[in-house]
Amino acid sequence: MSRHPPDHLLGGGEIMANNFNQRCPEMMALLRHTEDSIFFKDMDGRFTLVSEAKARRSAVRWEDMVGKTDFDFLPLEEARKCRDDEIFIMETGESIVDKEEELTRPDGTHSWISVSKFPWINADGEPIGVIGISRDISKRKRLENHVLRMLSIATHDMRSPIVSIASTIKLVARGRFGEVSESVRQTLTDVFNRLVKLEKIIGEYLTKSSVMSSTAIGRKQTLDLREDIIDPILGEFSQEIERGEILIDNRLGGIPGNKILVSANKNWLGIVYRNLLANAIRYTPKGGTIAYGFEDQGQMYRLNVFNTGPSIPADRRKSIFEMFDSEMSSGIGLPVIRELVRRHGGDLWCEEASGGHPNFVFTLPKE
């Protein structure tokens, strides 16, 4: 069978519309009335069918989009990112789900969309293109940014008094203001340690709100994945790993002994691995295993952090990436790191590995 779209999706826009309307009137009605941007593209990235909402946001009639590509409607860099995603989908057969992107409209305005793209497969199971659907989430992003600004202000205002209180308690415990009994000293030391922990949490929230409010990736550099990122972070968790008798296995996915070089912002990629490994340690039972891996997939690198903790139900594998979900990490940890990965041009998701154990997978583009 030909690796081209069906005949009724070929030809000029009006011819294609008539053919498609005769074969699939229900789908044509959906494309005319939905407010979502829906599109079908062939292997070369040319639009073969789009919804009217998609065309309207591109400032053209939908018939005029047929046969053209994103390079005809988007700035060069944005069009390249879209094309890279589609090449990845066609080469790997994997989907991209709910990826948030900032787009520049033909009139110069900016908007945020949540886009999902899937391989378009023919009857023989061969890829013939990409199907995509996107939704404008600009209003939601504005609301999220407002919440993050308020969070940043609140945590910033809380930090100084907490540091001051902790310092005073430390002085009292040391007897700077008079003798204290051993029981009082122990109580003060416990309070001091709790305040230090609270100050750390506040610092993490300040960092996360700053990351989510930022629109730039920051300076990228060539990094040795093992030497610059993974090994130092594992060192940070050495005590927790030892207490939990956790086996660290780097064979899953086959990270070889030679250097794995990636282009990324070192601080941000460190946040991603630190969060994933912290979660893995938290949920791995005593004597369990944490594994991390690497796979070269041509256009992208596929990386993962696996643990032998309890299974995450299918309906939870999506909600754990929602802002302020309370069951995983610190509530906004996973949404933050997924955003970091997406700003690098990749994506992050959770899947079920053999044995029902969770496997967090993310991709980074080659550069």
Image (tube, rainbow, N blue to C red):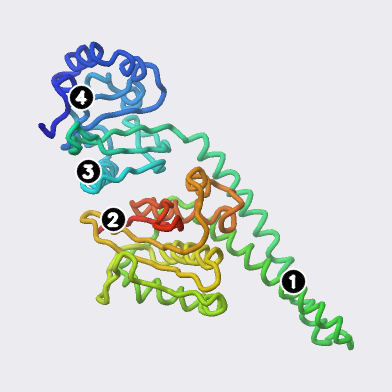
For residue 165, above or below residue 360: below
Lower position in the chain sequence, tag 3 or tag 1? 3
Give residue 267's position: percent from left, percent from top: 43, 66
Q: Which residue is mark 1?
A: 164
Q: Amino acid at mark 4?
A: Val
Tell me the tag on residue 308.
none
Q: Is residue 171 left or right of residue 51?
A: right
* Vertical relation: 286 (above or below) 2: below
Amino acid type, mark 1: Ser
**For mark 2, what is the residue?**
365
> Are dots 2 and 3 in contact, CB under 8 Å?
no
Quarter of the rendering containing residue 54: top left
Given residues 3 and 163, the one toward you in this image is 3
State the separation of the CA atoms marked 1 and 4. Answer: 64 Å
The residue at the point 52 percent across, 46 percent down is 316
- Label 3: state its secondary structure: helix
**CB under 8 Å between callouts 3 and 1?**
no
